Amino acid sequence: MFTPLVALLAILPAFVNAQSPVWGQCGGQGWTGATTCASGSVCTVSNPYYSQCLPSTGNGGGGGGGGGTTTSSTVSQPGQPTSTSSSPTTSSTPAAGNPFAGHNIYLTPFYAAEVAAAAANISDATTKAKALSVAKIPTFTWFDTVSKVPDLGTYLADASAQGKSSGTPMIVQIVVYDLPDRDCAALASNGEFSIANNGQANYFNYIDQLVAQIKKFPDVRVIAVIEPDSLANLVTNLNVQKCSNAQTTYLACVTYALQQLNKLGNVYSYLDAGHAGWLGWPANLTPAAQLFASLFKSAGSPNMVRGLATNVANYNALSASSPDPITQGNSNYDEIHYINALAPALQSSGFPAHFIVDQGRSGVQNIRQQWGDWCNVKGSGFGTRPTTNTGSSLIDSIVWVKPGGECDGTSNSSSPRYDSHCGLSDADQPAPEAGTWFQEFFVTLVTKANPPL
Ligand SMILES: *[C@@H]1O[C@H](CO)[C@@H](O)[C@H](O)[C@H]1NC(C)=O
Ligand SMILES: *[C@@H]1O[C@H](CO)[C@@H](O)[C@H](O)[C@H]1NC(C)=O
């Protein structure tokens, strides 16, 4: 990819000094940057924490995150032509503007069907009604095998039609999760590809298939979480042989994913960044920031990479009223402390990332025996609903990445995918295989939801 550097240099200073670019932030609590917008756009309040320069014409004439460039359009109004660029621009900073603003989020029929089936099995009328309401809360769809990729085309077509009929463009939320030798430090989520058996080529093909589906629907915005746990494992688990063996392949595969998705122009990517109890330990912050920043830069600073996703499938609070006793010793005892500590290190390493934070199963705190316990934690409740009203200008949105009710891992110690975390006394049992429905756990999430459903 080549950067039209001269053009960028000519354009950027004018924006930086005086105005926010189209799609850029222009206000909100704690915002100290420009409050006026580039010509052709109007500063529009999204929520108390975020105002954005939206095109005044309603036509997607502005750059979709190209740091003030105007060559690629990532937002289209339904019924109007989408201008797509054949050569996306590279900039030195992540995509500008909160990609969640001004869009509705697609509800995947797969999760809705799981929830409906689960609710049908609940006899208590109040609990059943609460359970059914979960089907209206957007989660991410995990593309954890190649065979699921065609479903993405179905969802995008559906979302495109919904956007056209409602007049509000749609977001489809996906998790890219099929690395060879996946989940190198644990066992429960091992994937279909192995490095020893053509894994990297198989992964590139998996990405190519995702790209082929997304390419057909440039009017739908895709938010992608990239490869949960993979880079965090490279920060802290290189002492595990499977992780050190996987290091080069993970980096090549994630780089390929970022670059190929970036070319589409309508995919905003967030790299998975573990959680407060993992990379949030003070000794891990700088190595983590350096890894994320060096990956971002060596991938060519892809302009649609918006930042990092934290707490994916985990149980931490965004903002805990008091530290959970298990976090003792870590000043970054919740996700907001972790993010606030990591952001400056990223910034100084050249990757001024924004964040999304999974709160899907974080409604109940102080229920784990160790901070590292991640498997079907007993007594969990659904957490804060997805919202761009996050209380932090660093956080684009609270999201539900892990679909609540889908199992973290089996408690059957004879299963090849058994991980001992799923047999701990704070893990709900008996638990089925990872990814399959765990009815008892779902019912607990519903009854213990905080705020209540
Ligand atoms: C509903 O309950 C029945 C009987 O316990 C069970 O066989 C079935 O698998 C359950 N379905 C779901 C979706 O949990
Ligand atoms: C546990 O896993 C083993 C090996 O896969 C299987 O044979 C057995 O039926 C499983 N037990 C239960 C209770 O699912």
Image: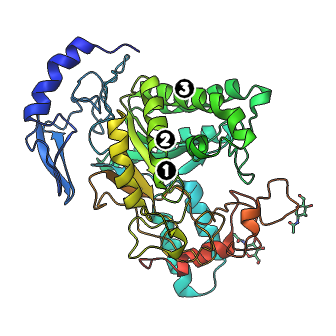
Q: Nearer the viewer, residue 341 or 86?
A: 341
Whether residue 439 is situated above or below residue 330 in the rendered picture: below
Q: Nearer the viewer, residue 356 or 41?
A: 356
Which amino acid is tagged 3? Tyr
Residue found at x 57% / y 59%: 111
Residue 318 found in image quarter: bottom left
Residue 397 found in image quarter: bottom left
Alpha carbon of mark 3 to alpha carbon of mark 2: how far? 22 Å
Which residue is labeled 1 in the image?
Answer: 283
Which amino acid is tagged 1? Ala
Residue found at x 28% / y 13%: 4
The disc placed on residue 384 is: none
Whether residue 191 is situated above or below residue 325 in the rendered picture: above
The C terminus lies in which quarter of the figure?
Answer: bottom left
Circles 3 and 2, Cβ within 8 Å, touching? The answer is no
User: 10 Å neighbourhood of mark 2: few (<14), some, or many (≥20)?
Assistant: some
Coordinates of residue 154 in the picture (x, y in percent): 55, 42
Whether residue 173 is situated above or below residue 215 in the rendered picture: below
The N terminus lies in which quarter of the figure?
Answer: top left
Q: Is residue 445 visible?
A: yes
Alpha carbon of mark 2 to alpha carbon of mark 1: how far? 8 Å
Sooner in the amino-acid sequence: mark 3 or mark 2: 3
Q: Secondary structure at mark 3?
A: helix
Circles 3 and 1, Cβ within 8 Å, touching? The answer is no
Q: Nearer the viewer, residue 346 or 157?
A: 346
Mark 3 or 1: the one toward you: 1
Which amino acid is tagged 2? Pro
